[in-house]
Amino acid sequence: MKLSRETWHAITILSQLARLPVGTVLDSWTLSESLSIPHPFVSKILQKLKAASILRAHRGASRGYSLARQANDISLREIAESIEGRELFKRCIFSSEHCSNAKPCALHEEWALVRPRLQEELDALSLAEVAKRKSRGSKR
């Protein structure tokens, strides 16, 4: 289970929105420029986050995106699964293409033990907490 650069950018985009006053709407171009992420990549990420009901799209004069819920109600697991897919925690972290219950890799059973704890940790970690850490400059 390797998280992609797309997931990292999604967390960065959402953290930016979480640090702003509630209800702030930003357009994709502003997010792209302020975070130095290519616009087509930002647009793709925003669509996935909207489809997962993490973001709300706004039309009209104040066109753009805002958080659909409070940042403390959005978990890191929800963000990761919105980008990577719901199968994220079912894939093996060591050999995702070749590992299955029928043909397990050498660490298959260990991953099965660790996976639920990782899911719990990511469920417990909110976007609000990540945004606070990012604003303090924390590398965690």
Image (cartoon, rainbow, N blue to C red):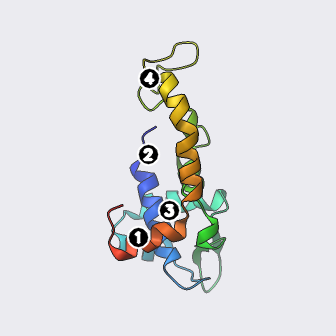
How crowded pointer 2 is (Cα within 10 Å; few <14, some 14-19, many 20+) is rated as few
Disc 3 to disc 1, how far (Cα)?
25 Å
Amino acid type of the residue that numbered disc 2 sits on in the rendered structure: Leu
Residue 83 sits above or below residue 74 on the image: above
Nearest to viewer (mark 3 / mark 4): 4
Dot 1 corresponds to which residue? 133
Q: Residue at x 51, y 57 (%)?
A: 44
Q: Which class describes the residues within 10 Å of circle 1: few (<14), some (14-19), or many (20+)?
A: some
Q: Is residue 125 visible?
A: yes
Q: Give whichever of discs 4 and 1 has the lower sequence position.
A: 4
Question: Which label belongs to residue 3?
Answer: 2
The mark that comes first in sequence, 3 or 4, is 3
- Check disc 4 and report its element: helix, strand or loop: loop
Circle 4 residues within 10 Å: few <14, some 14–19, many ≥20: few
| Side of 20 where 55 appears, left or right | right
Q: Is residue 48 visible?
A: no
* Secondary structure state at the residue bearing disc 2: loop
Estimate the x, y position of residue 3 in percent, counting from the top left. 43, 45
132 up-or-down from 93: above or below? below
Which of labels 2 and 4 is toward the front?
4
Q: Which residue is mark 3?
A: 43
Q: Is residue 1 above or below residue 22?
A: above
Task: Name which residue type carries label 3.
Answer: Ser
Label 1: element kind: helix
Name the residue carrying label 4.
107
